[in-house]
Amino acid sequence: MTQKLTVLDPTIEAKIENSILSDRPESLDGLTVGLLANGKRNSEELLQYVYEVIKEEYKLNEPIYANKGNASKPCPTDLLEDLADRCDLIITSSGD
Amino acid sequence: MAELSSNSFEFETDSDVIEYFITKGWTDGLPIIPPTIQRVTKFLETVPNISSDVIGHEPVKNREITVEKIAINAVMAGCLPEYFPVILKTVESILEPDFDLHAITSSTMGAGILTVVTGPIASQIKLHGGTSVFGPGHRANATIGRAVRLSVINTTGSNSSQIDKATLGHAGKYTWCITENPNSPWTSLHEDRGFKPTDSTTSVFAGLSSIQVSNHHSQEPEKILRSFRDALFTIGPNQGEIVIILCPEHAAHISNSGWDKTQIKDYLYEISIRSNDDWNQGSYAPSASQGGVANDTKLTNVALGPDAFTIMVAGGNAGAFSSVIPLWGGGSRSKSITKVI
């Protein structure tokens, strides 16, 4: 009988963390939007443009601006928590 | 035998393993050595770590990188077991947050990982720093660099069909590991970085494709180094770090004139400067706010300072060809890392 060759898997799966989607608002009227730029050039301009478009349809509060500074690193936890405390929803973008 | 936690698969032949791994996207496109339990165990026996030890965390893809997975990839690359301590420390280095591995392995800019191993271990494992230093033919160079690349592909998922979005990339993304020429007239890389001569170290750089610089007619340091200006201008202004590989012939001429690495760095910094108008003529504006400004005669250097230049000596004794290796992200956003093996 031929002996089988046993080899090992070279890959690693991402660690899965359980999370749930937040409730979606029925309307944006009266809500505060966070604009989280990713640090890429033009990301802030892109977000501002998106905000202006949404504002034409809804009565939004003044937005809260933030920039995570480095597109290739996760957003710092303290910045995310601060935005979560102060905003009803967050929009993020990747400009370049 | 070490306790291994990876999933395992059974096949009839080596060819079946190779075809399966290629189909799964677990290789660089070339065939691999099947990572059997016996082979992986031999690699693990060369280091004091246990197989489940975590040597680093990739935060964007949220993956914890273990010693066992690096051993599997090192076997696949065709390494000898005695290379494994070098590979493990090199992968540990690229997982340092300052190296920004996710950025350099996903970016359109297309960086490779240049590994430079210096100190006594380089000759012990027969790493090559001489003729055709970046070319084929030397097992330690070829397979250590490949092991680093396969580790990136398989432990972080950065392969060219998924996360790696390099526009061009370059051949150094297959494998890119060297040592310095042992006959360098100056101190070696790790000594320049504050380590003892007797230390063995690995250094990693997020290198873009290199630019070859030729000068066969000069022996004076100034004339040789002025040949680097055009190559340096192609990189762009305000670079935080640039690698310069001097071939032995250029290094000998410069050293025979009594120059050390400090003088080389100072001179390269001094001469690689031009007006913002000139920068704007090409593809680079020194800063976004200055882009397109007419008659901007302010001068901007290629490098942020003389210490932005890392000088090494490598390559064959014949020929006066050196090279400039630009680093990803303006040489500032990914920092080179050196660790003791």
Image (cartoon, coloured by chain):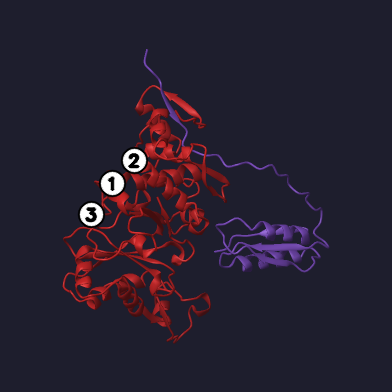
Residue B158 in view of the camera: yes
Residue nearest the observer in this picture, B13 or B203 = B203
Which numbered disc flags the more N-terminal residue, 3 or 2?
Answer: 2
Residue occupied by mark 1: B124
Question: Which chain is mark 3 on?
Answer: B
Q: Position of residue A96 (x, y in %)?
A: 54, 64
Visual hue assigned to chain B: red
Is residue B268 depicted above or below A90 in this figure?
Answer: below
Q: Given contact means CB atoms under 8 Å apart, are the residues at marks 1 and 2 in contact? A: yes
Visual hue assigned to chain A: purple
SS of the residue at dot 1?
helix
Residue B259: name its quadrant: bottom left
Residue occupied by mark 3: B132
Q: Given contact means CB atoms under 8 Å apart, are the residues at marks 3 and 1 in contact? A: no
Kindly report the distance in space between the C-alpha atoms of the residues bearing marks 1 and 2: 9 Å
Which numbered disc flags the more N-terminal residue, 1 or 2?
Answer: 2
Determine the residue located farthest toward the top in the rendered image.
Answer: A1
Residue nearest the observer in this picture, A8 or B110 = A8
Which numbered disc flags the more N-terminal residue, 3 or 1?
Answer: 1
SS of the residue at dot 3?
loop
